[in-house]
Amino acid sequence: MDSIITAGILLNAAKIPLSVFRRLCGNYQPEELFTGESFWDELGMTPQQKQRLSDFLAKPSWAERELERTETLGARFITAKDIDYPARLLDLKNPPVGLYVLGNANLALPSASIVGTRHPSSYGQNTATQLARALAQQGVTVTSGGARGIDSAGHRGALQEDGITISVFGTGIDKVYPTENRDLFRRIAERGALVSEYPLGTGGEGWRFVERNRIIAALSSRVVIVESSETGGAMHTASMGLGLGREVWAVPGRISEETCSGSNRLLGEGAKVLWSIPEFVGSMSGNHRQIVLDFGEGQETQPPAPELSDSEKAVYSLLQRQGKRVLDDIVAESGLDDSDVQMALLTLEAEGLITTEAGRYSAV
C-alpha cells in the first residue's frame, strides 16, 4: 500500500496543514509519521494537531481500512503530490492535504461555479439550468455543491448537454445529502465527479457545508450567484471567491424578493452583472455566437447584443429570455428604476430591437 497515500489520508482526516504533509514528503520517509510525538514535533505540529492525529492512530489500521473502503466505492484519494490534485486549490490559505474523488473528471479543466438559494424562483431555477447548459456546450465544467435549488439546477443543466459537472460535498462522498438527489449524484459521478475532503461516513453538519464552500470557489475561475439571500451560503462562496481573486458574477433579481437580496447586494458592491448568458459564456469560451439556449419555447441562437447602455442591455436581455412583458413586469424583474426602464424601451424600440403590442414588449 502506498505509504504517501496512507499518510495523506491520516493527515487529511486529522486536519493537519498541507505544509506539514509537504515537509514530511520532502524531507523524510512517509513511514516515519508512525514513529510518535517526537517526530511530530519535528514536523512542527501543534498540540491540538498531534492529539487529533493520535486519535486516528488509536483506531487499528484506520488509514488502510479507509483506503480499502474508498476503492470498494469505486473512488480514489488524491494527495497534493498527485498530478490530479487541482493546482487552483493551492490559492487557499488552508488547502486540504487530499481529496476523495468519485468519477473521472479532470478537476483542472476550465470551470465556473453556479450557486444560490435552496428555494429559488422558477426564473432563478431556469436561469441556472440554461447557464449550465450553455457552459457545457462550450466545454466549461460546472461546479456546485449538490444542494437543493440552484445547485441542483446547475448540475442538471450541464448533464442535459452531456457536459462535465463537479459536486463538492460537505459530507463524505458516500453520504447522499439531500437524499432526493441520489440519482443526480449517480449521474454526476458518471459524467463528472463527486468530491470531498472529508473521510467516508462523515455526516452533514452546518460548519462543514460552510467550510467546503472554499473548495467550490477555489476550483472555479468564476463564481456565479443566481439567487441568494444575504445570509445564504452562496454569499460565503462569493466572499471566498473574491478573497481568492476569482471573478464573482450575480444575476439581477427582483428587489422585492428576499431570495435575491444577497445577490442584488453583490451587484451594488462590485460583482459583475450577468445580464446575458451568451455574452458571459462567450467571454469564457471565446465563441458566444454558437451558444444555443432553450427557455421553454424551442431553441434559438442568441446573437450578442449591440452597443447599449447597461440598463438597455439588462432590459433587452430580459425580453430575449421572457418576452411579452408589460412595463411593470420589466421594472420588477430587471431591478431598474421605472424611468431607466422607460428610456431603455424607447431606445431599444427606436433601434428596431424590440416591438410592442397592446402594451407588451418583446425582443425581435
Image: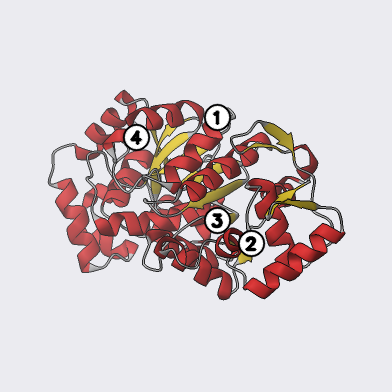
Q: Position of residue 317 (x, y in %)?
A: 69, 54
Q: Position of residue 249 (x, y in %)?
A: 59, 61
Q: Tell which tag, 3 or 2, sits nearer the viewer.
A: 2
Q: Amino acid at mark 3?
A: Val
Residue at 44%, 60% in the rendered image: 228
Q: Secondary structure at mark 2?
A: helix
Q: Alpha carbon of mark 3 to alpha carbon of mark 2: how far? A: 28 Å
The answer to whether marks 4 and 1 mark residues whose Cβ atoms lie closer than 8 Å is: no
Q: Is residue 18 above or below residue 264?
A: above
Q: Amino acid at mark 1?
A: Gln
| 248 on left or right of 15 | right
Q: Alpha carbon of mark 3 to alpha carbon of mark 4: how far? A: 22 Å
The residue positioned farthest toward the front in the image shown: 358
Q: Secondary structure at mark 1?
A: helix
Q: Tell which tag, 1 or 2, sits nearer the viewer.
A: 2
- Give the label on residue 327, or none: 2
Q: Nearer the viewer, residue 109 or 162?
A: 162
Residue at 44%, 27% in the rendered image: 187
Q: Which residue is mark 4?
A: 181
Q: Alpha carbon of mark 1 to alpha carbon of mark 2: how far? A: 34 Å
- Give the label on residue 160, or none: 1
Q: Which residue is mark 3?
A: 224
| 256 on left or right of 276 | left
Residue at 37%, 51% in the rendered image: 119
Q: Amino acid at mark 4?
A: Asn
Q: Earlier in the sequence, mark 1 or mark 2?
A: 1
Q: Earlier in the sequence, mark 4 or mark 1?
A: 1
Q: Alpha carbon of mark 3 to alpha carbon of mark 1: how far? A: 19 Å
Q: Tell which tag, 4 or 2, sits nearer the viewer.
A: 2
The answer to whether marks 4 and 2 mark residues whose Cβ atoms lie closer than 8 Å is: no
Q: Position of residue 234 (x, y in %)?
A: 43, 59
Q: Position of residue 321 (x, y in %)?
A: 65, 47
